[in-house]
Amino acid sequence: MTISNNVQKRMAEGSWVRKMFEEASILRQRFGDENVFDLSIGNPVMEPPIEFNQELMRLVENPIPGMHRYMENAGYPETRATVAEQLSLETGISFDKSDIVMTCGAAGALNVVLKTILNKGDEVIVFAPYFMEYDNYIDNHGGITRVLPTDEQFLPKLDALESAITAWTKAVIINSPNNPSGVVYSEGLIHQLGELLRKKEAHYGTQIFLISDEAYRKIIYDGLKYPPVFGHYLQSIVITSHSKDLALPGERIGYIAVHPDCSQREELISGLIFCNRVLGYVNAPALMQRLVRNLQHVSVSVAQYQKKRDFLYNNLIEMGYSVTKPQGAFYIFPKCPLKDDLAFTTELRQWNVLTVPGRGFGLPGYFRVSYCVDDRTLEGSLVGFKKVAQKFNLCAG
Amino acid sequence: MTISNNVQKRMAEGSWVRKMFEEASILRQRFGDENVFDLSIGNPVMEPPIEFNQELMRLVENPIPGMHRYMENAGYPETRATVAEQLSLETGISFDKSDIVMTCGAAGALNVVLKTILNKGDEVIVFAPYFMEYDNYIDNHGGITRVLPTDEQFLPKLDALESAITAWTKAVIINSPNNPSGVVYSEGLIHQLGELLRKKEAHYGTQIFLISDEAYRKIIYDGLKYPPVFGHYLQSIVITSHSKDLALPGERIGYIAVHPDCSQREELISGLIFCNRVLGYVNAPALMQRLVRNLQHVSVSVAQYQKKRDFLYNNLIEMGYSVTKPQGAFYIFPKCPLKDDLAFTTELRQWNVLTVPGRGFGLPGYFRVSYCVDDRTLEGSLVGFKKVAQKFNLCAG
């Protein structure tokens, strides 16, 4: 056997998102770029904000000696300080630079957190639909994923959570705005979550981390205000990246923020820095750390994404699809008119419209549409959506 | 327990290199930058070659739409193609872009390789002195490190290797030019290594990978020609980075190259790409991939490093230290005049000279000096080396 049995097994399960992304390449070669409507992956077509390019130009024209060298594994103190400042502003809680570890994106951040806290066999709870790479990340570090259902609005069911937490539960991962559903958790829900976790911690005499994946925190619509978890639970760890808010997914830059009043905070943060090092990240890319330092308050145009959401949502509703209106991120997660979500996305693919079956997010019977694409692609996809809607008698037309 | 037992245990063992790096910060604050001679870490003081800055400027002035987006997990095809071309030139073996996976540095590369190939309990052989982060990387993925001795020139003893290989040996890691000793393995030695591994593979009916860590491949002295492993063993995997040859350690850019005739090559490469994704790297930083694309033939001034080596080597020899002359990399690994290498480096630290005890590389009784520093630091360190040599009666003076 050349490769590890476990890797072989997990590869066979595959990633539906990546499968579709690769399928799109093949279709493009066959039908031409303009005839393929790839709504499969969260790879924003938007360019980074103008401020990013200004910072980059400023840095290139005024290079700092040693700017490409190693720094502390946690990242540049100056970058960590501005992240802490911005978080303090957003949450009303006072963060220090020592609460922040710069990472290779949110995926790097989550791997570092899980490696740091998990003993073999520890359980991590997630709520379906969810980003299924979490399974791989949890498995990387010896943990076991427990998948819990959500209600019809894709929100966690607290009674199900209450009965699922055991003495082995080390963490609960939430993701709001959610990939794939686009829902944003309310402050009330987060408060209840915090209360429940505190109760269970007391009951078992354990520490249960609330890991909040906030990769889409800044992409939020309809004037909603993002409710930070930090106000409601001390054992909370935020992981995030600048892949979406600054449209830099290929650059692998993000961070971990630990609640300043988390118990055993220092041990935890030393562990995170150690794991950032030994997992081979060593440190987040130096140049990107310098660039995002002064861009903590900047983000891509959320209005543009909201326009795309409205366009797609309104059209899908009109065609008869059953859809929960997303409040953030850049995904929409309609119900399939067929029971078999894979069969349904295959129907859409026949019109060169690429989406991801709900089973790719632990929830069959739905499909994910990523609308971080240009308007031409979004408009062009409507024909396929309509044809398939008609085939399955969704609408009168 | 807040953090994982294993992480806690490994943190306690610590990294001597990082300890000294942090110690240096403290000394600098106390005595001032100019009075501290930090020879502890391999963090090149040299700036990247002028060609790097030219490429960066060219790219910033002519940005490519989508240049910060996700790409294939293996990296940009164009970058992989130029890496393959350069490797073909250097080795005389024909590499294709599909043999290359771009990674977050050599540390990322090695983690990806080990995750891909190791089943729990598989053994990986290393030769002391060695870069001890290997232990952490092997442990990350369930492997067991077997440390073998070297001869007085820090070269692997093949008879020891022959008896150490078992049915569970999955890989042998070599590192030439070597950190910390600076030795370069000869073509003859690599050939013998290949023969031995083939014999053992046949004996056990297993596949044993030769993983060659070539982070210092381009930093080689005295007109030596680097002997590539690829010519001598089919199951070979090269990991490397541009941290040293382009002086970009903070940027985390490197690659994995698999021998084109490796058995089960496709399965192996699919595994590597998968692990690059699920370990949370996702892909090597996009901008750096574009930059190194056209710099495969470029490197920092090796002549400058050679001058530093000569300066330090000659001075240490004159003071009476016992030193094997390094042929590459930017480290020198003298014998301690004391049995206790930690006590010896503590003596040096009293003169504000920071080095790393040999135990940090699995070989007590020696100490590592990193000379990728400016001349002022190197010159300034001589006082301390001399005082300590005198204290332990190394020289007449």
Image (tube, coloured by chain):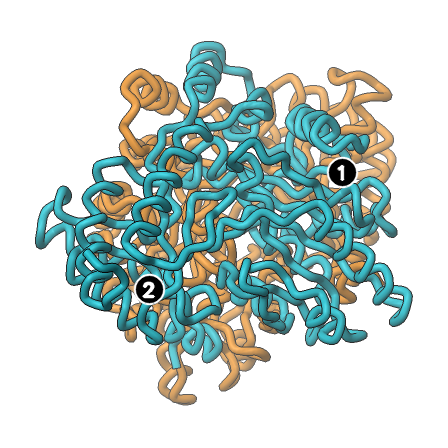
Chain colours: A cyan, B orange
Residues at marks 2 and 1 on the same chain: no
Where's residue B115, x and y in %?
A: 50, 66
Q: How many marks?
A: 2
Snapshot quadrant of residue A169: bottom right
Where's residue B318, x and y in %?
A: 67, 31
In this view, the residue in front, B26 or B251, is: B251
Residue at 73% from the left image edge and 49% from the top image edge = A188
Residue at 75% from the left image edge and 18% from the top image edge = B33
A348 up-or-down from B325: above or below: below
Left or right of A163? Residue B372 is left
Q: Quadrant of the C terminus of chain B?
A: top right
Q: CA distance from mark 2 to mark 1?
A: 38 Å
On the question of residue B146 being in view, the answer is no
Residue underneath mark 1: A99
Q: Quadrant of the N terminus of chain B?
A: bottom right
Residue underneath mark 2: B269
Q: Amino acid at mark 2?
A: Ile
In this view, the residue in front, A395 or B236, is: A395
- The answer for which chain carries disc 2 is B
Between disc 2 and disc 1, the foreground one is 1
On the question of residue A250 being in view, the answer is yes
Q: Amino acid at mark 1?
A: Asp
B181 up-or-down from A45: above or below: below
Residue at 86% from the left image edge and 31% from the top image edge = B350
Tag 1, which secondary structure?
helix
Snapshot quadrant of residue B204: bottom left
- The answer for which chain carries disc 1 is A
Where's residue B185, x and y in %?
A: 44, 55
Left or right of B87? Residue B314 is right
Q: Which mark is residue B298?
A: none
Where's residue B237, x and y in %?
A: 38, 61
